[in-house]
Image (tube, coloured by chain):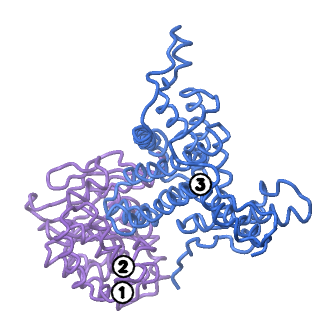
Chain colours: A blue, B purple
Amino acid sequence: MSVDLLNFIETVLNGLMSGVMYSLVALGFVLIFKASGVFNFAQGVFALFAALTLVGYQTGQVPFAHLINELFGTNYHHWYASMPNFLAIILTMITMIALAWVIERLVLKHLINQEPIILFMATIGLAFVLEGVGDLMWGSNVKVLDVGIPSGGSEWLEQATIGLAPEGSDYYGMYVDVLNVWASVIAVVLVVSLALFSQYTKTGRALRAVADDHQAALSVGISLRTIWVLVWAISGFIAMVAGIMWGTESGVQFSLSLIALKALPVLILGGFTSIPGAIIGGLMIGVGEKLAEIYIGGFFQIGALENWFAYVMALVFLLFRPQGLFGEKIIERV
Amino acid sequence: MADIKAINNNKKSDENDDILIVNNIEVVYSHVILVLKGVSLNVRKGGITALLGGNGAGKSTTLKAISTLLASERGQVTKGSVKFKDEYIHELDPSQLVKKGVIQVMEGRHCFEHLTVEENLLTGAYTRSNAKEVKLDLERVYNYFPRLRDRRTSQAGYTSGGEQQMIAIGRALMAKPTMILLDEPSMGLAPQLVKQIFEIVKEINKKEGVTILLAEQNTNIALQYAEYAYILENGRVVMEGSAESMRDNEDVKEFYLGISGEGRQSFKDVKQYRRRKRWL
């Protein structure tokens, strides 16, 4: 195999891997959008909040420590030195579920049957409030998140591919981050279990029913509020997974909430209502970005193409297929 | 209300026979729009009672006030009470009400389009936990509506209007209700199909002992199947009586059946006449 071909494969592979990360964020959007027709602008902040909370639990940070110390002149910082990863993740999960419940109580409950745009505005507000609360609770410094997921280049792949290049060429093997491989595995597990859940359980069926028709769902005795808490909790859980992955990769910092913006083109490509769409869309964006960076950017000498190419792809899709690849066809009876 | 014209003198005497008592309810939408101005009605247990009236008379609102679906449309019962089996229900939420046995089949069917026919029916049993019983009931519903059995795996959005109405009724039946609030089952259906649906409704009423409160614009067919009827106009009950007496009543014939002394009339003339003579 020529070095060019190997480089191409490596680019695609890395694109797929980073695409999975986008998919993880997009998935949270799709779930909430399907069930409550709300585009949850706060999804990125969810991921941030989950990651912050996880680090907080792990390192035994006292929530609101700065505030408490300021008010009472005390000097609390940490409860304990460390907590097992497993326990910290479980606690974070519980926190995210509690958060979903609180959001339903404080925000959604009062906005039943309002225009989608009003709900959207509410989630924008929510994003800012949550970001502020996260700051106040856990502090604004950049934190290191390590839950024991291995990261760094895969040596195995490097060794396996180094021999594929022709003799004498200057090739050092492929580079793929193990963290991304893990993210892919987790994403696959998540999607499969979600699909099984919504297809084969009573609650899953109710979830899809609510997505189709709120009023009718109410009329058969499905409690919208229970379903919403459930959906927001699941999205919170997915946000946590995304937060862990992104946080491990680039540290837990407040710019983490901007990954929501990366999910937008993914949703436009895949369709706002399709779970497979979120996955495929994410992968396409990931691969498209990486290829564009290397080949288009390389050819025309444009730098940082990766940062905006996704939006160009989204724009093209909006022009030619606005419902996205897998967006639900609007069923119209003839 | 003094202006109610009770044309039936042997009005239901046994009050205990009434499964549902709506007492003088007033409904306001968005805090300002007064839609029901004091509606009272009694529904006899095990019977079919019809709510008749034209567009905007308040039929659907009355049903939604009973099923408490109003709240999700920014409507509110501001006065009066609704009693179901000696229990006030107007402050419950729909899911509690479904558990108590009152379920509404909404106007315009409202099927879950992307769910299959069978999944649609199963969502009706959301409040029930006994899977075995639910399975038996599913068979029962398929026996009432054999056509749904043939289409069980198709997406509900792609079924015909008649089939969707069957899905909606079947779905309600899956909740094992004691009372069904049936809103405009004839809407948008061919006369042949309307008759078929009403036959099945009657059968369900007889065999399952399900009480039915029916809101209908199609006065003619409703009076054929119901035993007792109320006529609403402008958010008020303007007339009530047994279906028989309604059918023979000159005003009902004139206004709702389009039949006058000289036989059928053009609707245009009916409207003209109506402007001069009103009940209220």
Q: Residue at x 73, y 64 (%)?
A: A11
What element does badge 2 sit on?
Answer: helix
Which circle marks residue B151 in the picture?
A: 1
The amino acid type found where label 2 is placed reads Val
Query: Do marks 3 and 1 both belong to one polypeptide chain?
Result: no
The amino acid type found where label 3 is placed reads Val
The x, y position of residue B169, in whole percent, is: 30, 75
How far apart are labels 1 and 2 at the CA level? 7 Å
User: Mark 1–mark 2 contact, CB under 8 Å?
Assistant: yes
Quadrant occupied by the N terminus of chain B = bottom left
How far apart are labels 3 and 2 at the CA level? 45 Å
The amino acid type found where label 1 is placed reads Arg
Camera-nearest label, 3 or 1:
3
Disc with the residue nearer the chain's start (1 vs 2): 2
Quadrant occupied by the C terminus of chain B = bottom left
Determine the image quadrant of residue A25: bottom right
The x, y position of residue A130, in whole percent, is: 56, 36
The x, y position of residue B45, in whole percent, is: 14, 66
Say which residue label 2 marks: B117
Determine the image quadrant of residue A243: top right
Q: Residue furthest top?
A: A73
Camera-nearest label, 3 or 2:
3
Q: Residue at x 62, y 56 (%)?
A: A155
| For residue A281, side relative to residue A234 (left or right) | right
Chain letter of disc 2? B
Depth check, front residue: B228 or A145: A145
Say which residue label 3 marks: A178
Q: Residue furthest right?
A: A300
The x, y position of residue B160, in whole percent, is: 43, 85
- Can the viewer see residue B246 in this picture? yes
